[in-house]
Amino acid sequence: MKKVTISRLIAQKAEGTKITALTAYDASFAKMFDEQHIDVLLIGDSLGMVLQGEDDTLPVTVTDVAYHTRAVRKGTQNAFVLADMPFMSYATPQDTFTNAATLMAAGASMVKMEGGAWLCDTISALVERGVPVCGHLGLTPQSVHVFGGFKVQGRDNDKATKLIEDAIALEQAGAQMLVLECVPTSLGKAVSEALTIPVIGIGAGPETDGQILVMHDMFGISANYMPKFSKNFLMETGDMRSAVKKYIDDVKNGTFPGPAHSFE
Ligand code: KIV
């Protein structure tokens, strides 16, 4: 097993090999996922909900994400380590540079930020300074109060068209990967086909270039809520390592997500 790089993830998309991703927040789970050959580990700001018990991701700080990124990096040999820029940590150029530098220094190989074409200048400025960027479109949880709840996005034609335009703009600005959350299967497919960079879906149907789940949802142990697009692989397999392996196998062979875990 070789180290996963962004070039390899882009090559996987080109050759049609599905990309597997999970969130991780500590060294032990990172090591377990890495040993099962997961491609990408995300230190998501979902940590606010699944570790800290918050109702949404807004209270998470750069210090929180950096702390968990350091731990995940220590447990990881090969997987690609991606860290979330939390709410308002990329509101100004100076904040963006300082906070992205903190996460890269903590061990991230790329940072992820939520938003459409308005982020293009921020993305180009980071890439010019040596910070690789992953975009995040669809249901962007940092905007939950703008959306009025955790709702499927891009269901009408105008919104779907705008989302595809945003995705293309992010790629043109220099983003090298995109997370696409909670959109209809047809839109997940359209966005993946419109881009050359890998599109990692979560609730975006089976036709994206890869899949990501929050690890607590994949194990069925989230405190409050199990999203429709997730699946309890631990219940099906009975132990954690087998659950991770089954998730990876099912993503690779296209059996996860099925219609029950996707939106029309
Ligand atoms: O914070 C997170 O875990 C995420 C995933 C839902 C993709 O952004």
Image (spheres, rainbow, N blue to C red):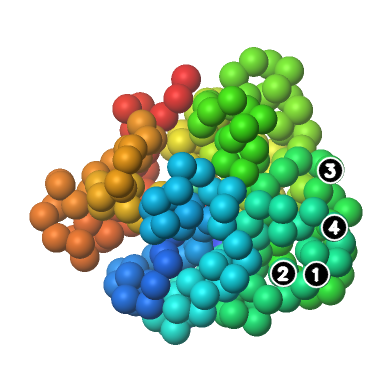
Instruction: Nearest to the eye among marks 4 and 1: give it.
Output: 4
Tell me if I can see residue 154 in this picture.
yes
Tell me the element at label 3.
Answer: helix
Badge 4 or badge 1: first in the primary sequence:
4
Question: Circles 2 and 4: CB distance less than 8 Å?
Answer: no
Rendered image: mark on residue 97: 1
Residue matched to label 4? 92
Question: Circles 1 and 2: CB distance less than 8 Å?
Answer: yes
Mark 2 CB near ligand 1 (8 Å cut): no
Task: Provide residue 210's location: percent of width, then percent of height.
Answer: 49, 50
Q: CA distance from mark 4 to mark 1?
A: 9 Å
**Residue depicted at 72% across the width and 33% down the height:** 164
Q: Nearer the viewer, residue 151 or 244?
A: 151
Badge 2 or badge 4: first in the primary sequence:
4
Tell me the element at label 1.
Answer: helix
Task: Provide residue 237's location: percent of width, then percent of height.
Answer: 14, 52
Rendered image: mark on residue 100: 2
Question: Circles 2 and 3: CB distance less than 8 Å?
Answer: no
